[in-house]
Amino acid sequence: TIDVGKVMKRKVRGFDIDKGRPDVRVYDMSEGWPKGIEKADLIFWDPPYYRKMDYAEGSISHLELEEYLTFFRGLFESDQVSKGTRMAFLMSDWDDPEEPGRGAFIWDYANMLIERGWKIIRHIQAPLPTQQVHPDIINRFRASKKLARLERYLLVAQKE
């Protein structure tokens, strides 16, 4: 995302809880939006997915489900984001393996956005290429005789 923004001659800032490359600033989103977000025309947000991967220590992915969703509610309703700002929000569904029907689904995030003053203007399914799925994950799904999720969703919303 940063590289594409630079190619398009956009002002781009990248933030992550774990420094992965030199042009990414270390920032913990649990402290709220980074300073300067009110000037952004577009926020591209690919937050840690709930219990999907082993993210850096301190990641919101390690919270309990309700705390995790509360984290998003707080940022979605923040007055730091200006009216008219667009956000592209990339997320994947999560099903609780112990309690069918319980999870964190794309409609949960969409509803939270709408309830907090955002208008959904696009919903895009973003399939993962099968080359990105680790063989251990494939074997786990085969053994459990469950279908694997091989997609994410991109919600594009505008702050009203």
Image (cartoon, helix red, strand yellow):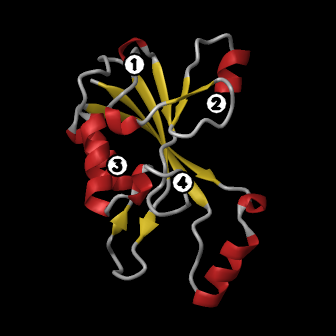
Location of mark 3 (residue): 109
Q: Residue at x 33, y 33 (%)?
A: 31
Within-10-Å neighbours for mark 2: few <14, some 14–19, many 20+ = few
Between the residue at mark 2 and the residue at mark 4, the CA separation in whole angstroms equals 19 Å
Residue type of the residue flagged with mark 2? Thr
Task: Please tell me whether residue 156 is drawn above or below residue 82 in the rendered image.
Answer: below
- Determine whether, in the image, residue 8 is placed left or right of residue 52: right
Q: Is residue 43 above or below residue 60?
A: above
**Which of marks 4 and 2 precedes in the sequence?**
2
Q: Secondary structure at mark 4?
A: loop
The residue pinned by badge 2 equals 1
Task: Residue type at mark 4: give it.
Answer: Tyr
Q: Which mark is residue 89?
A: none
Q: Are marks 3 and 4 in contact (CB under 8 Å)?
A: no
N-terminal label among 1 and 2: 2
Is residue 94 placed above or below 20 in the rendered structure? below
- Secondary structure of the residue carrying numbered label 3: helix
User: For mark 4, what is the residue?
Assistant: 55
Q: Residues within 10 Å of mark 4 (few under 14, many from 20)?
A: some
Question: Residue 132's image quarter?
Answer: bottom right
As helix, strand or loop, the secondary structure at mark 1 comes to helix
**Pointer 3 or 4: first along the chain:** 4
Crowd band around label 1 with a 10 angstrom C-alpha radius: few (<14), some (14–19), many (20+): some
Which residue extends farthest front? Answer: 57
Quadrant the C terminus occupies: top left
Question: Hey, what amino acid is under mark 1?
Answer: Ile
Amino acid type, mark 3? Tyr
Question: Gap in Å between the C-alphas at discs 1 and 4?
Answer: 24 Å
Question: Which residue shows up at 23% across the image and 23% down it?
Answer: 79
Label 1 with label 2: CB-CB less than 8 Å: no
